[in-house]
Image (cartoon, rainbow, N blue to C red):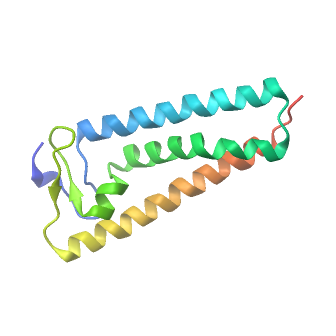
Amino acid sequence: MTENNYIPGTCNIGPAEIRRRRIVMWLGCILSVVTIASFQQSHAARIDRISIALPAFVFAIGFVQSRKKFCLAFGFMGAFNFGKVGAITKVLTPEQRAEDRKTALSLLGQAILLTAVIVAVTMAMPIK
């Protein structure tokens, strides 16, 4: 893929970077499942279950970024990458950077909302 695939506020990562975000998503998913299983094993109190927030946030960040093909960090930095992992290119215009930051904030909000839902469901689960 080339730099021509960059669309301000819409798409700032290519296949290799998307693959990295999917790995983060699956890591967060596995950590979340293991954490919930440990709650079941230890009969964790409701308040202790709030600790699901960290692995759930890892999952949510990876999920949102891979689904939207947009990296939050790149959006805040004013960068994009459609080549090999780690080879970033700076966004040229202030208008493009502003659009990317707006999208990054929106996706961060989506990840926080998804995390809050996972935390709420986990805290509401009956643990025997």
Q: Quadrant of residue 113?
A: bottom right
Indicate whether 103 appears above or below 111: below
Q: Residue furthest bottom?
A: 95
Q: Residue furthest right?
A: 128
Residue 37 in picture, x, y percent from top left: 72, 26
- What residue is drawn where x is 40% and y is 45%? 67
- What residue is drawn where x is 60% and y is 50%? 115
Question: Is residue 126 found left or right of 73 in the rendered image?
Answer: right
Q: Quadrant of residue 72?
A: bottom left
Residue 113 or residue 32, whichever sits in front: 32
Question: Is residue 2 found left or right of 61 in the rendered image?
Answer: left
Q: Residue furthest top?
A: 41
Indicate whether 24 appears above or below 116: above
Question: Is residue 66 found left or right of 3 in the rendered image?
Answer: right
The quarter of the image holding the C terminus is top right
Residue 2 in picture, x, y percent from top left: 9, 47
The quarter of the image holding the N terminus is top left
- What residue is drawn where x is 37% and y is 64%? 103
- What residue is drawn where x is 56% and y is 28%? 30
Q: Quadrant of residue 112?
A: bottom right
Question: Is residue 120 found left or right of 62 in the rendered image?
Answer: right
Residue 59 in picture, x, y percent from top left: 52, 40
> How many tags in the picture?
0
Indicate whether 77 appears above or below 114: below
